[in-house]
């Protein structure tokens, strides 16, 4: 849907709105976790010790510290680290006297690091809590390998009577203690591959005397105002995802010569010619899919790959697309004019956001490879004579954040669901960009501190320094 805004044509997508006055729901797991912390705090208070929670609490880190006090309630300076796990249901393999708890491998590795004492407290609010000293419990390599803790409900009860046991376990702050390393930062690495989620199930072919596409379109226009694409001519036949036995196709081609076959005959074939023919059909579907949304295909000279670019607005005002970036809704200018340096009142050229498409088959699945680029025109239509120089310059200036943002934008734009006014192509559908979750990452602030001023602006606009971590 297009609307006017500050002299620009802004293309908007429906944005979910939170109801006025409504509060953000707190996940059930967070509530249960806090109830477990409350149980620990109450028992530590009954012991006469001090409880200091960490903020925020962590499923894999330290939820808090118990600082021990003597019988006169004076701090001894001795501390014990605590990890809390809580549930409102039954424990694993629970009986009247015992139950089990299986530790996550990554959690356990972190708990056992450092030289500070670390205890695990498993609770069932509001009254039950059990504990074990992690480092002594997992001294045996065989026990460590199983990651399984067997709790004795009587011997491992975490209550007021456990206070003395904590004294034997704790160490003074002055002992040079150190705790585990910071919690691993999980990241998602994005590729520039957009999966083809599904495509038409059958391909139709028919004999024809037409030799060039223009002749086919001319014949079709006698029966329909806007002829569809999604077909190509080859060896005196037309091949298409459209059912050629139906109108308007049957009025132009001999229905008696129509043959159809499963699209997978081409899609999964190892025959290079069949694969190329399938890519041609996918390409025609993509052209229609994007054409409905104001994106054109620029065909370059023979042997040089063409690309898609956003069309100019009718009045050549800037076109801005609203889209959902990594963390928030953002705006991306996809077409705009650039003033002449010698005469600021004159527009020297127009820049269109673009991408080079390439369909690839990997491990039996089809993907659209997206390579961001730019298209330059004199007036929004005619190619700019200095396109190559302008493109070379912007490629030198742009950093990884801008490249990733453009890739993510195109992926979301192509994949996004149909809206009320503009339907996508019915023969091809895409999934989200392929992502690879990894169990490590780099602090956003560290990346941002190394970015140049121009890139910091890009990071802020697109949702954070984590843009630098991907692609």
Image (cartoon, rainbow, N blue to C red):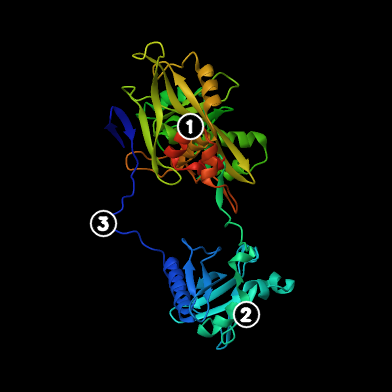
Q: Give the residue number, with chain letter if any, for mark 2.
A: 150
Q: Point out the frontmost of discs 3 and 1.
A: 1
Structural distance between the alpha carbons of marks 3 and 2: 47 Å
Dot 2, crowdedness within 10 Å: few (<14), some or many (≥20)? Answer: some
Q: Quick check: 209 above or below 273?
A: above
Distance from disc 2 to disc 1, alpha carbons, whole Å, reads 55 Å
Outermost residue on the right side: it is: 141
Does label 3 or label 2 sit earlier along the sequence?
3
Give the residue at x 55% y 63%.
61
Disc 1 secondary structure class: helix
Where is the N terminus found, in terms of image quarters? top left
Query: With respect to residue 352, does 202 lie above or below?
Result: below
For the residues carrying marks 2 and 1, which lies nearer the camera in this image? 1
Say whether residue 147 is left or right of residue 358.
Answer: right
Q: Secondary structure at mark 3?
A: loop
Q: CA distance from mark 3 to mark 1?
A: 38 Å
Which image quadrant: the C terminus? top right
Residue 211 visible in the snapshot? no
Q: Mark on residue 453? A: 1
* Residue 293 placement: quadrant: top left
Which residue is tagged 3?
Answer: 21
Residue 170: image quadrant is bottom right
Please report whichever mark, 2 or 1, sits nearer to the chain's N-terminal start.
Answer: 2
Whether residue 21 is visible, yes or no, is: yes
Residue 263 percent location from the top left of the image:
56, 43
> Crowding at label 1, few (<14), some or many (≥20) Cα neighbours within 10 Å?
few
């Amino acid at each position: 849907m297009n609307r006017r805004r500050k002299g620009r044509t802004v293309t908007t997508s429906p944005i979910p709105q939170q109801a006025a006055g409504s509060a953000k729901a707190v996940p059930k797991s967070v509530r249960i976790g806090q109830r477990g912390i409350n149980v620990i705090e109450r028992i530590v208070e009954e012991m006469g010790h001090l409880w200091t929670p960490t903020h925020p609490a962590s499923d894999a880190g330290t939820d808090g510290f118990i600082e021990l006090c003597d019988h006169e309630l004076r701090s001894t300076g001795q501390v014990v680290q605590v990890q809390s796990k809580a549930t409102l249901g039954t424990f694993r393999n629970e009986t009247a006297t015992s139950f089990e708890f299986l530790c996550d491998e990554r959690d356990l590795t972190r708990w056992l690091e450092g030289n500070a004492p670390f205890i695990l407290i498993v609770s069932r609010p509001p009254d039950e809590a059990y504990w074990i000293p992690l480092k002594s419990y997992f001294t045996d390599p065989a026990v460590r390998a199983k990651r399984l803790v067997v709790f004795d409900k009587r011997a491992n009860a975490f209550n007021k009577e456990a206070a003395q046991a904590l004294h034997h376990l704790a160490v003074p702050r002055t002992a040079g203690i150190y705790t585990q390393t910071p919690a691993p930062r999980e990241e998602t690495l994005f590729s520039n591959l957009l999966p083809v989620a599904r495509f038409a199930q059958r391909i139709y072919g028919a004999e024809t005397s037409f030799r060039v596409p223009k002749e086919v379109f001319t014949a079709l226009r006698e029966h329909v105002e806007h002829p569809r694409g999604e077909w190509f001519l080859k060896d005196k036949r037309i091949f298409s995802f459209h059912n050629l036995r139906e109108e308007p196709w049957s009025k132009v081609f001999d229905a008696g010569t129509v043959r159809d076959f499963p699209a997978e005959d081409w899609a999964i074939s190892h025959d290079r010619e069949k694969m190329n023919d399938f890519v041609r059909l996918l390409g025609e579907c993509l052209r229609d899919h994007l054409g409905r949304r104001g994106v054109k295909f620029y065909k370059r000279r023979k042997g040089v790959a063409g690309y898609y670019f956003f069309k100019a607005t009718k009045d050549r005002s800037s076109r801005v697309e609203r889209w959902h970036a990594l963390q928030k809704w953002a705006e991306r200018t996809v077409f705009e004019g650039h003033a002449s340096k010698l005469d600021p009142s004159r527009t020297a050229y127009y820049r269109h956001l673009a991408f080079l498409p390439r369909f690839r088959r990997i491990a039996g699945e089809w993907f659209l490879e997206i390579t961001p680029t730019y298209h330059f025109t004199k007036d929004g239509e005619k190619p700019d004579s200095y396109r190559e120089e302008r493109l070379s310059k912007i490629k030198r200036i742009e950093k990884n954040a801008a490249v990733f943002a453009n890739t993510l934008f195109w992926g979301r734009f192509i994949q996004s669901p149909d809206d009320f006014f503009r339907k996508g192509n019915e023969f091809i559908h895409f999934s989200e960009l392929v992502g690879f979750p990894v169990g490590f990452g780099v602090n956003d602030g560290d990346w941002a501190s190394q970015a140049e001023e121009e890139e910091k602006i890009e990071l802020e606009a697109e949702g954070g320094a984590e843009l630098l971590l991907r692609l």
